[in-house]
Image (spheres, coloured by chain):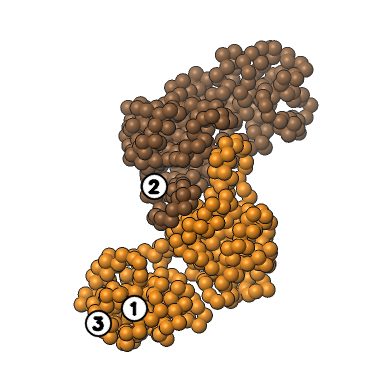
Chain colours: A orange, B brown
Amino acid sequence: MSIALVIPDRKLDQLQQKLQQQLPGVAIEIWPDVQEPEAVTMAVLWRQPPGCLSQMSNLKALQSFGAGVDNILIDPTLPDLPLARIVDPMLTQSMLQYLQGVVQHYQLRLDEFSAQQRKQIWKARSPRKLQFICVLGLGELGQAVASHFAGLGFVVSGWSASQKTLAGVQCFAGETAFSDAVGDADLVICLLPLTALTENLLDQQRMALLKPGVILVNVARGAIVDDLALLQNLDSGHIAAACLDVFRTEPLPTEHPFWQHPAILLTPHISAVTNADTAVAQIAENYRRSLAGLPLLNLVCQQRGY
Amino acid sequence: MSIALVIPDRKLDQLQQKLQQQLPGVAIEIWPDVQEPEAVTMAVLWRQPPGCLSQMSNLKALQSFGAGVDNILIDPTLPDLPLARIVDPMLTQSMLQYLQGVVQHYQLRLDEFSAQQRKQIWKARSPRKLQFICVLGLGELGQAVASHFAGLGFVVSGWSASQKTLAGVQCFAGETAFSDAVGDADLVICLLPLTALTENLLDQQRMALLKPGVILVNVARGAIVDDLALLQNLDSGHIAAACLDVFRTEPLPTEHPFWQHPAILLTPHISAVTNADTAVAQIAENYRRSLAGLPLLNLVCQQRGY
């Protein structure tokens, strides 16, 4: 019995070593150099190429290496097995730190002062009035983020597919409530999962429902935002600024207009990075559970997509 | 009896109106159009031109329009009268908000990611380890700032001319302790008053005592920092980045190299702006006190300079 790490384009020796310490006696194989595919009972996945699991005929469980699973479910050859994801409390901390820094960046108008600096313009301005924040997506991270900003005194609304209840947050659910959820927001944070239903959700039509001068922050998945519609809305000023940490293609291709747009703050997918130790502990625990026939921790509903 | 507002190059109708509401029956005159200089018993000052008070022969009190008084004491013709400054709790709030935003800006490496964005470089980096903050100057603002960051879990040291005691902050005093105060700091915040003793205090020699890779934030007065030494230390990398809100000459002259330096974040003196309502209340109270022969609130020691 063994575990296969199917995580292309990443150095995996450290992960392999740490997993080995947690699971002595279990072979930890790194794809594509899997010596005994039929011995693999669990595969740890991140952007796996379709077909790569075909020879692992005794798989019992699948484990995402991150919090998201859209990059895993996209594979049409994925076997119909229990799939778990990592739920990392440090990931929430890292996301909160990122978003709080970004909100303060815009409150202090560091975006405008940087632009003024490049043009040698001296013009004092008082802080931006960011009072109302809307969080799109109320999963683990979305709930933590909404509660965090509500606790800091912001007026916070949340929008999700199914109705949620969250202290201090006005929760909206479903397509028809979108306009009410975002209508008053000075800043919108996208934390939706990427599914067939959320792809291009932030298109021209829905962007038109945002308040003029709004700031958009995307820390979920690039494909939820219609790139062209965003550029048009930034150019017209309907959206005042955008902070983007995620992109349709990552790394963002050099020819993409986002790079040089003056109203975009671009960070290279750093808002929430899975902590290796947390990931290792959860992978090891789920491996033990799959052997014992227990349900995996942090199971994903494959049909729902998250 | 009247008050003269001696605040060149600023629209003063609102201030005049608000003061009038607080002090009905008192003439509020705006320099240089003072109708009856000999009736003026209190002058509100900010960067007053030397000699401008010479005809106000019945002055009893001087009031700074801001928290600092260096721009007032520089006038060799200043009469030897009680001088008060504004102590504005909202000013402290505004300073804390500014500094917290700046610290998070550097923690998140938004400076580096902005630079990468301009060069179309995609390179993820984990947050900067900013653990140790040193606050130079432990007056009203310095103490509030040091306590604030200590409360957030940073290791905080403070340095001042006279020994201070502050819960959770390691306090150092005097020239010989400077090196110990700043030696371990990842980020140094300058909140010193500008006096003959602090002018050019941050020169080449003292910058050499800072930890390599330190970040310098100046929210006090531009003249405390030796501009040329700062540029040299930024170019050598000894100082990794500087956030400057104050400058030797304001607005910063267009030819000044600070504008275009890639390691400088420049803001147009916005870190702590006196709230008009607070200022009006304190000016009115001090006017009443000066008439009643009571000591002014927030008196400045002219000899010490703050």
Q: Please report contact status of discs 2 and 3: CB closer than 8 Å, yes or no.
A: no
Q: Residue at x 27, y 66 (%)?
A: A13
The residue identified by callout 3 is: A36
Q: Is residue B287 visible?
A: no
Q: Is residue B123 above or below residue A5?
A: above
- Quadrant of the snapshot with the N terminus of chain B: top right
**Res B181 → quadrant:** top left
Amino acid type shown at disc 1:
Ala
Callout count: 3
Q: Residue at x 56, y 47 (%)?
A: A111
Q: Residue at x 45, y 28 (%)?
A: B227
Q: Please report contact status of discs 1 and 3: CB closer than 8 Å, yes or no.
A: no
Image coordinates for residue A256, horizontal then vertical, percent: 52, 58
Amino acid type shown at disc 2:
Leu
Q: Nearer the viewer, mark 2 or mark 3?
A: 3
In the rendered structure, the answer to whether residue A149 lies left or right of residue A214 reads left
Q: Are marks 1 and 2 on the same chain?
A: no
Badge 1 marks a residue whose secondary structure is strand
Sooner in the amino-acid sequence: mark 1 or mark 3: 3
Q: Nearer the viewer, mark 1 or mark 3?
A: 3
Image coordinates for residue B20, horizontal then vertical, percent: 75, 30
Q: Which mark is residue B130?
A: 2
Q: Which mark is residue A67?
A: none
Q: Is residue A102 above or below residue B216?
A: below
The residue identified by callout 1 is: A43
**Res B137 → quadrant:** top left
Image coordinates for residue A195, horizontal then vertical, percent: 53, 75
Q: Please report contact status of discs 1 and 2: CB closer than 8 Å, yes or no.
A: no
Amino acid type shown at disc 3:
Glu
